[in-house]
Image: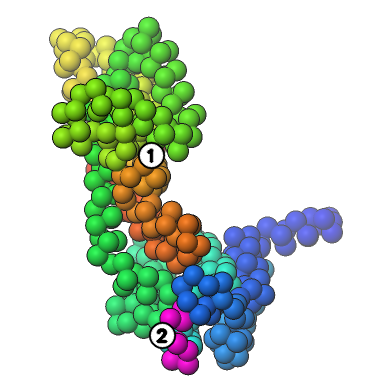
Amino acid sequence: MVTKSNRDSSRLSRVNKVAFVGSLIGLLSPFFGWLTLKPNRLATGTSLSLWNSLGWEIAVTTILLWITILVLSLSDGKKWQPFAFAALANIILIMTSIAAGSAAAGLISKSSDLTRVSLSSGILISAVGALIILISARHQVAQNRLEMNLIVWPWLAILLIFLLSGWFNHLSILQEYFNNSSRLRQELLTHITLFSGSIMAGILIGIPLGIWAARSNRANRPIFFLANITQTIPSLALFGLMLVPLSALSTAFPFLQSLGISGIGAAPAFIALIIYALLPIIQNTYTGLRQINPAVIDAGRGMGMNRAQLLRRVEAPLAAPLILVGVRTAAVQTVGNTAVAALIGAGGLGQFIFQGLGQAAADLIILGAIPIIVLALIVDLAMLIIIRIVTPRGLTEAPA
């Protein structure tokens, strides 16, 4: 006998919960401002609703699309459902973005040269909802990589074409970019130099420490004690702690200043970033070596291998995937931590973030934050590819 509670439970199980949440988020977006019209880059400005900024036709169409997604999320899962979700989410992202670029051009043409039009919370909330829908659709067709990419990325390709054509040039974030493009390139290069140099140093220090901790019980505790303690220090405090000893050293030994070592600048930033990168690398190196089956080690010894040969030919290949997972974690973490280095004069994309905070210029903050996010995603994807390449065929279950 099927009870009412069983029917309700069965009906609930057919709901696509991720798409349902995404559609609810999307339906909340019309209640917020979609564009902000400011007399200049620093003024607060006036928030414009979906109807007043993009027009009634776009507003009604957007709401109807979100309602359609909501209804679909409550229906039984069909094979075509993820493609419908993806198509509707792509339409919302493309339509609202293009309309925002057109609306910005119209508003600027009716105002002074100092007027700025920026994206407001409503359009960002709608974009978050659409991305959640795309994530839901992606997971439903995860077995087919071609289909997965075809349904997830069309919006990005189309918006990039419009971006390169100058369609969005009247948005304030693009105007900030044009005003700071040369400086942005310089700070991006500085950011990459800081994080890549500190990660390379972290690898050269962290992997030998992890091997030492795995081989010696005496070294195990102090290594992890120090690595864990440094992780508990807030990043800004750790950068600050580097100032005093390095200032004292550069004063006592003036030749260090000629090498660029002083209390502020790149030197303290490098040291602090290296310290922060160590724990995941040490931890994963230790775990990767300790999880190797002892029988494999015994087999290597039985073949006459010494400790160095065992490490090079047996242990390192087997532990490499997990070690690289630690490097991946440290690298992505360091991309973000490098932004704080701007506070001690090391430069990097954090310069834009803190300058924007000081001037209450949200677009300048976004100008610094977006490249950091993109850089972190690129580093994460590159490390994931490297991990898959170095993973032995017999270890396809290795974590990534």
Q: Secondary structure at mark 1?
A: helix
Identified by mark 1, the residue type is: Thr
Residue 278: give x, y in percent of width and height: 35, 29
Q: Which mark is residue 329?
A: 1
Q: Secondary structure at mark 2?
A: loop
Residue 110 counted in the magenta span: yes
Identified by mark 2, the residue type is: Asp
Tell me which secondary structure the magenta stretch mostly adopts. Answer: loop
Q: Residues within 10 Å of mark 1 (few under 14, many from 20)?
A: some
Residue 392 visible in rendering: no
Q: Which mark is residue 113?
A: 2
Quadrant that contains the N terminus: bottom right
Front position in the image: 331 or 211? 331
Front position in the image: 142 or 264? 264
Residue 182: give x, y in percent of width and height: 24, 65
Residue at 23% over, 33% down:
261
Q: Is residue 294 above or below residue 197?
A: above
Q: Quadrant of residue 316?
A: top left
The residue stretch that appears in magenta? 108-117
